[in-house]
Amino acid sequence: MIGVDWGTSSFRAYRMAADGRVIDRTSSPTGILFVESGRFAEVLRRAILPWTNAGERRVLLSGMIGSRQGWVEAPYLACPAGTSDLAGATIPVPYDGAEVRLVPGLTFEDSGVPEVMRGEETQIIGALADFGAGGVACMPGSHSKWVRVEGGRITGFSTFMTGEAFAAFSGHTILGRMMKADAPADPEALRRGLARSADDGGLLRHLFGVRTLGLFGRLSETSAASYLSGLLLGHEVRAALAAAPDAGPVVLIGDTKLCALYADAITFCGSVVRIAKGEAAPAGLARIAAEVRWGQSEG
Amino acid sequence: MIGVDWGTSSFRAYRMAADGRVIDRTSSPTGILFVESGRFAEVLRRAILPWTNAGERRVLLSGMIGSRQGWVEAPYLACPAGTSDLAGATIPVPYDGAEVRLVPGLTFEDSGVPEVMRGEETQIIGALADFGAGGVACMPGSHSKWVRVEGGRITGFSTFMTGEAFAAFSGHTILGRMMKADAPADPEALRRGLARSADDGGLLRHLFGVRTLGLFGRLSETSAASYLSGLLLGHEVRAALAAAPDAGPVVLIGDTKLCALYADAITFCGSVVRIAKGEAAPAGLARIAAEVRWGQSEG
């Protein structure tokens, strides 16, 4: 089968064996933000042509391609949801020459505010072996997700705008003036920010310290971005850990560099981490595909 | 005497009687960001010409005009500081035809991170009558200040980047796409945001709710900005009140519209407010001027 992890900024396709092994792969920067509406079929066709020529007829998509801005909108499935729930809720996508289906995103309601994900649910399914009976995953990104897994199902999750907040504060507030652009990461400044995040006063107050420490020559231009990163990560991680005090090691899933950064932050804040083994997205696509009832509805 | 409240974006000058009564006033958008370095004397001279022609010879400046980006840098004075401390630490500014002095800003150190203010100290002095033996002031702005006053002196303070955070999140993140520009304030959405700020999860998580509530049709484009404002104000106010549990009514000092917004937020979060009477800046300038030893050092 063919699995496609199709997000906002990138497109990653995998040809996989029945056991989930990746046989071939291709990727491009044709995330949904960079594809004109109506051209999704064309982008997919070009990418997977060698594989459909070789006889592949089943294609499973996950990610923002199922959003309102994507190809076909797949309604969110409510938590708790596991592999068979997701497989049963895949929706057909009109396409000639192969059966294309789309994994729905998930939603979860907590304190009257909905949470949503698209794509992360598939990665969690691909990393289920890392959780044992249950646990918590952290999936770094511009909107990072903390996901609760129990008995092979996703039972709840929360989203933190940490990455986007970092970009907004460093790029569009007075704090950016305290920073040298493209300075290398400063682990000591990161730790200072992580430590500060434990103090009283809250994030909106802690942020101002980036400015005053700089004004007083106690935080250099080359360290200020790492300090800000530590503040924001510390606030995220402390809030997320407080919500899951008994979850055991945090399973990190995602980009290697971001996972390493989060591993430092989570360890600093007193929890244990485990980096998920293997590639979560193709593994999840293969696992869900194995439970889809293909051929029930042609696109 | 002449008092000048000279900030980042505006210039406000007052001619005052010995008892602090404002006899005349003038203002212009010539804040320090809009005056070329080296032209400060010229801007001042033009503004106060009618008053110096009438015989005024003493000019006291407060605000960002004493910062590194201003006319002459006045070193910060450490807390605690009262009227006579500020008067004794005023510094002379070179100027022909009048004696010009500058009120220093204040600094305060808490948990290893410095705090700074320039201009607010003068407003507090002008509003001392509103505090009685002591209390806490809230001074809204793009960087709002919460100031502790005891026995007529400023004993400590903290800064929250709430206003600038609102601008960054609404203007430079995905949350802005959920908002209709220039929608009128929605008090009900503000209260929803204020209520949400009391939940677990922290600000970085609560922010994402602006997006998901919008996606699910539960927060309209015309209400989203007020909801975001409520979230941010709620986080600021709850943190500030937690740091001053016994302070009594919060004295609000500043722009009338912003004070009304903060009054709603503080009341919602369970404290009592009092709006400072009169104009704090000229009152403070007059009070400090009355304790300055004029004529000791000509500029």
Image (cartoon, coloured by chain):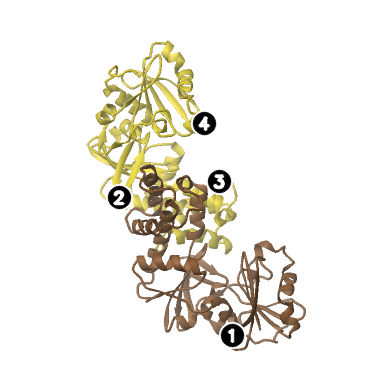
Chain colours: A yellow, B brown
Q: How far separated are the C-alphas under marks 2 and 3?
A: 41 Å
In the rendered view of the protein, which quadrant contains the C terminus of chain B?
Answer: bottom right
- Calculate the distance from the C-alpha at mark 2 to the C-alpha at mark 4: 34 Å
Q: Position of residue B224 (x, y in %)?
A: 42, 51
> Closest to the observer: B153 or A230?
B153
| Residue A124 image offset from top left, x and y in percent | 32, 35
Mark 1 or 3, closer to the camera: 1
Residue that numbered label 4 is attached to: A34
Disc 1 with disc 4 on a shared chain: no
Label 1, label 4: how far apart the Cα atoms are = 63 Å
Residue picked out by circle 2: A112
Above or below, A225 against A30 in this view is below
Residue behind mark 3? A184
Q: Are marks 2 and 4 in contact (CB under 8 Å)?
A: no
Residue at position x 26%, y 23% in the image? A291
Q: Which mark is residue B20?
A: 1
